[in-house]
Image: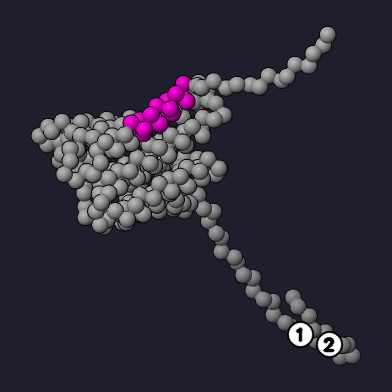
Amino acid sequence: MSAIEPEAVPTERLSPADFLTLGNALCGIAALRSIMVQGDFRGTDEQFFAGAVLLMLIGAICDLFDGRMARRWRSTPYGPHLDNLADVITFGLVPAAMTLAWAGFASQWALPAMAAAAAFFLAIVVRLARYVTAAPEPGIFRGMPAPLCAFTVVSIIVLSPPIPVALAAIACVAALAVSRLPFPKPGSRTLAGMMVAWAVVGGLSVVAWAAGIPGGGEWMRFTAATELLAACTIPVIMLRLRRAMRVAHAVPRTRRRTLRRPRRVSVRRRAGERVRTGRH
């Protein structure tokens, strides 16, 4: 008896890179829980906020190395989608919730803060969707990367400018996320090492700030200021580099040599012959 067996549907197990991506999502959920427990930042303990920032830093390290791990060992077809979903949680939803909690849920700035937080969250969603569907460009991202956007918002909150200034700055970050400005990819070991070193320094400053160590608050604000400065200067530097590369690789234009227009001459023949006019 011959029975037609159904075709075996190939099942993809989660790869080590996928587990690292899920670790990023788990950090985002835990950071969101810290913000929900914290509530309004003003007049309350800052340890929960520091814990949320520390979890975001751990999630950023997971996000940095899951792609490298996927290229080194193996990746699954749904790995990029898992990465996008994790980034939406950690680098989109958490900074938006921080913005709402920092501005105050019952203050007069609650509605503008809601608008800024919604604009930021939707910009991150659009930026990640565009990243999946667009053709990759070697060495650069188009638009500010989601982790950099998230930590720029955190830096704005840490520096605590006036609320209208902070909300306007967060709206500018949302615009940079969906822009076409070039940002470097952390493809080289040097750039990846610099990012890990910055995350370690930022984590230590967050721990010192939360533990109440003398100078921890100043060190935390200094780290936030350097991150904000880097976020502002990176696109300017990239635009200048790309412009210089285009000029260096441009084909030099040769000037056209214009030929002189031949003069009209008259050739007169002897008597009895016709007169002919021609060009030499």
Q: Which residue is mark 1?
A: 266
Quarter of the image where the C terminus is located: bottom right
Rendered residue at 17%/38% (across/down): 45
Residue at disc 2, secondary structure: loop
Q: Residue furthest front?
A: 106
Of residue 198 and residue 262, the one placed in the foreground of this image is 198
Q: Position of residue 119 (x, y in %)?
A: 40, 52
Q: Position of residue 32 (x, y in %)?
A: 33, 36
**For residue 98, above or below residue 257:** above
Q: Position of residue 121 (x, y in %)?
A: 40, 46
Whether residues under marks 1 and 2 lie with C-beta atoms below 8 angstroms apart, the answer is yes
Position of 229 with respect to 14 (left or right) is left
How far is mark 1 from mark 2, CA to CA? Answer: 8 Å
Position of 249 with respect to 172 (left or right) is right
Q: Position of residue 73 (x, y in %)?
A: 50, 21
Give the residue type at disc 2: Val
Q: Which mark is residue 99?
A: none
Q: Which residues are magenta?
A: 16-31
Q: Which residue is mark 2?
A: 275
